[in-house]
Image (spheres, helix red, strand yellow):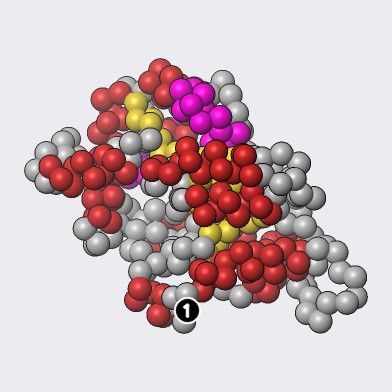
Amino acid sequence: MIPLSVLDLSPIVAGATAAQALHNTLDLARHAERLGYHRFWLAEHHNMVGIASAATAVVIGYVAGGTSRIRVGAGGIMLPNHSPLVIAEQFGTLESLYPGRIDLGLGRAPGSDRYAMQALRRDPMAGDAFPQDVVELQSYFRDADGSQPVRAVPGAGLHVPLWILGSSTFGARLAAMLGLPFAFASHFAPDQMMDALALYRSGFTPSDSLAEPYAMLGVSVVAADTDREAERLATSLQQQFLALQRGRPVQLQPPVDSMEGQWSPMERAQVQHTLREAIVGGPDTVRDRMRAFVARTGADELMITSHIHDHAARVRSYEIVKDASA
C-alpha cells in the first residue's frame, strides 16, 4: 500500500473546548507516529466554532515539538490571507527548530466566510495573485546570493517543501506548471478529482523540487470494528456537512442511531454527493475500498481525515486504517 498520512482539523466536539481539541491533536499525532503514518497536517480555517487549528503555524510547532519523527505541516496555509514573507519566516522558523520534518501546503481559498475575510483585512481579489505569491514564497526559501533586497530570516536556504492544494483544476494546473507535489481535497470536493489528476499528470514540468508528478488525495475514513458501528460513528461527519450546507457551522456532534428526520431528501442527496468518496466500515470494508480507490485514482499517497466525535474511537479508526493497509 502507498504511504498514509493524517489531516487533522483539531475538531472541537460538542461541549468541549479548544484546549481539549488541541491536546487531542497532539495525542493523535503521537499515535500516528507510532503507527507509522508518514505526515500529520493541520489546516487554516477561521470563524469555525468546531475547528481549533486557525493559528496553524503555532499548532504545527506544538505537534512537531511533541513528536520526534513524523513529518508535520500545513494542509494548508491559505496564502492569500498572508504576506509570503511572513509565511516564509514562520515556516523557516519551524524548519530551523524541527529540521527535515516540516511541509508547507498552500491553498488559495480564504478558509473562512466573508465576515472573517473582512476581519482578516483580506482583499476579496487576493486569490487572483496566488500563483505570483507562491513564486515569491519559493524565492524566500532559496539560497541567498546577496542580491535580494529582502530575505526571510530564518527561511533563506532552508528549501522547505511546498505543496499546492486544490479542490478544482486550477491548483492542478499550477502544481504541474511549477513542478510541485499536488494534494487534492477529494474528501470534500470530489467532483473534479479525476480531471484534476489527469491535468496535473499530463502537464507536469520537472523542477528542482520534483522530477515526476506526485499526487496525494484527501479521503474521509470512518473505521470501526464493525460496519454497523462505523456507520453510526459517521453520522457525526454527516451532521457536520449538513450544518455547513445550511450555513450554520457547529461543533462536532455526537453520533446518532439514524439520520432520519435530521435532513430533507434534498439535503441528504447533497451531503451524500459531497461525501461520496468517504470510506466507512469495518476492517475488511475499509481495506477493500481503500485498495479500490487507489487503483482507480493512481494516488501516490492518501491523507486520511476522520471526523469522529469520541477521541478514543478516532484513534481506533486510524489504527484500523493502518492495519488495513498492510
Residue at left 85%, top 64%?
Answer: 143
Which element type, helix, strand or loop, lies under badge 1? loop
Apparent side of residue 255 relative to residue 1 in the rendered image (left or right) = left
Q: Position of residue 87 (x, y in %)?
A: 64, 69
Quadrant location, the N terminus: top right
- Read off the residue under disc 1: 123
The extreme left residue here reads: 261
Q: Quadrant of the C terminus?
A: top right
Nearest to the observer: residue 70 or residue 21: 70
Q: Which residue is located at x 76 percent, y 54 percent?
A: 99
Instruction: Tell me the residue at 28%/56% (across/down).
Output: 244
Q: Is residue 224 above or below residue 217?
A: above
Task: Say left or right for 128 vs 237.
Answer: right
Q: In this view of the protein, which residue sits in the foreground, 197 or 324? A: 197
Up the image or down, 163 lies above or below 219; here it is: below
Q: Residue at x 21, y 58 (%)?
A: 246
Residue 208 at least partly seen: yes
- The three-letter amino acid code for the residue at tag 1 is Asp
Q: Position of residue 269 (x, y in %)?
A: 20, 41
Q: Which residues are magenta?
A: 291-316
Whether 304 is among the magenta residues is yes
Asked if one can make out residue 67 in the rendered structure from this viewpoint, the answer is no
Q: Is residue 292 above or below residue 163?
A: above
Residue 191: x %, y % from top left = 38, 43
